[in-house]
Amino acid sequence: MTRHAPPPAYRTLDADGIRAVLAAQPALAARLGGPPGAWRVREVSDGNLNNVFLIGGPAGGVCVKQSLPHVRVDPDWKMPLDRTAFEAAYLRAVRPHVGDLTTDILHFDPDLFVLVVESLDRHVVLRHGLMQGGDWPDAARAVGAFVARACFHTSPLALPFERAFDLLEPFARNHTLTRITVDLVLTDPYRVHPRNHWLSPELDPIAAEIRADPAVRRRVGALQARFLTCRQALLHGDLHTGSVMVSTGGNQAETQAETRIIDGEFALPGPIGFDCGLFVGNLLMHLFARGDADAETRILRDVARFWTTFRTDFTTLWRDAIAAGTAGDAVPADLFGHDPSLLRQAQDDLLRDIESDMVGFAATEIIRRILGYAHVPDFDLAPDRAHRAHRQNAALRLARDLLADPDRTGTTDALLALARRHAQAARHTKV
Ligand code: SR1
Ligand code: MG
């Protein structure tokens, strides 16, 4: 799917171009209703890579996402267009298993690299909602359920290996975006590189410490190997809080708030703990960015809820498939002579590996979002530069400790305890 020069039919769409593309698709035109001239086109591009528009008509709305031949936030960084094709393929692969935890794909244009999905115009990006002080107590559970279902059903735990390999193979060619992850997430922060940057010289010592620590480097090497060699399931590949939409009005009083996982363009075969770790790492950064006791309670609650839901749902799906005789080739029940306790131990072993990967990848996500190329805006919540540096420093120290001692920190309980300790220490240190 990788192409380096835009195909002749490709052009970057403006509002009129979007109206023309939608008008040419009768089902989309009917969904919007009225004449194309009456459709409102609003650009809502927020990520680093693509143009995104919400289109509203008298009858309804759609969301249009188009790949650009470069990184959206850096036009000098040229890039092939195939990422929306991977996102469309990811949606097709997981939607049957996750239903309304993601969006319905309405149309994909392979010449324009335009993906049309349901409009989520009554939702906000979870990261933005959290930054505005909102609380979505069910969102972490929904993301846990999403990862459990999407990963279980695309793995050889659920499928004969031939079907799993056929499903995963096209995503192994998502080279451009996987290269971004290998470089920006898992490599750059551990070397001196011009793409790295951070906002305050106060972070120079911890950045140097992280780069120099042999235990950190050893663990990062192991995580790089896990990421590139452990093809457990089809991953979302970029599951941060900017890839989660929550319905507005969601707060403790609203129990029916909806959660949707979007933006699966980084999809690839990989270790399940990578998706878990990106989500958890972004939750933890929000905790440190806010820096108050209330955020600590809510975010640690969400981390625990995410993991508990993921673990419970994944295990249940697996046990149900075994009971129904439909499970895949990996860890087959008859290997254990129908000894249920031995089978449970084998399942616990695999879940422990995922949990330990989750903690490691959460740490690498924190480090790359503070010291690498693509930062998160959560730390802008700090009242001034000194507080921002202080909070980022605390998050980085947590991440460093998680990487340096994986045998002691590789469980959710250990992660929660250490995060609490670092958050409280940061609160009680004078800035
Ligand atoms: C050049 S892309 C930088 C980052 O933005 C995306 O959302 C991914 O997180 C990627 O690492
Ligand atoms: Mg994205």
Image (cartoon, grey):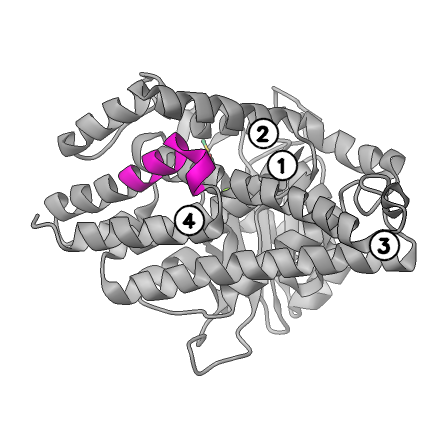
Magenta stretch, overall SS:
helix
Q: Which of marks 3 and 1 is in front?
A: 3
Q: Name the residue under label 1.
A: 271
Q: As drawn, is 420 to the left or to the right of 85? A: left
* Viewer-side label of 2, 3: 3
* Residue located beneath label 4 in the image: 414
Amino acid identity at mark 4? Ala
Gap in angstroms between the C-alphas marked 4 and 1:
21 Å
Which element is circle 3 on? Answer: helix
Disc nearer the start of the sequence (1/2):
2
Range drawn in magenta: 397-409
Residue 339 percent coordinates (x, y): 84, 51
Q: Which mark is residue 227?
A: 2
Marks 3 and 4 in Cβ contact (< 8 Å)? no
Identify the amino acid type marked 1.
Answer: Pro
Above or below — where is 353 with respect to 4?
below
| Number of residues whose C-alpha sits closer than 10 Å to that of mark 4, classed few (under 14), some (14–19) or many (20 or more) | some
Question: Where does residue 280 sit, x and y in percent of width and height?
Answer: 46, 50
| Mark 2 or 3, nearer chain start | 2
Q: How far apart are marks 3 and 1 (CA)?
A: 22 Å
Q: Alpha carbon of mark 2 to alpha carbon of mark 4: how far?
A: 22 Å
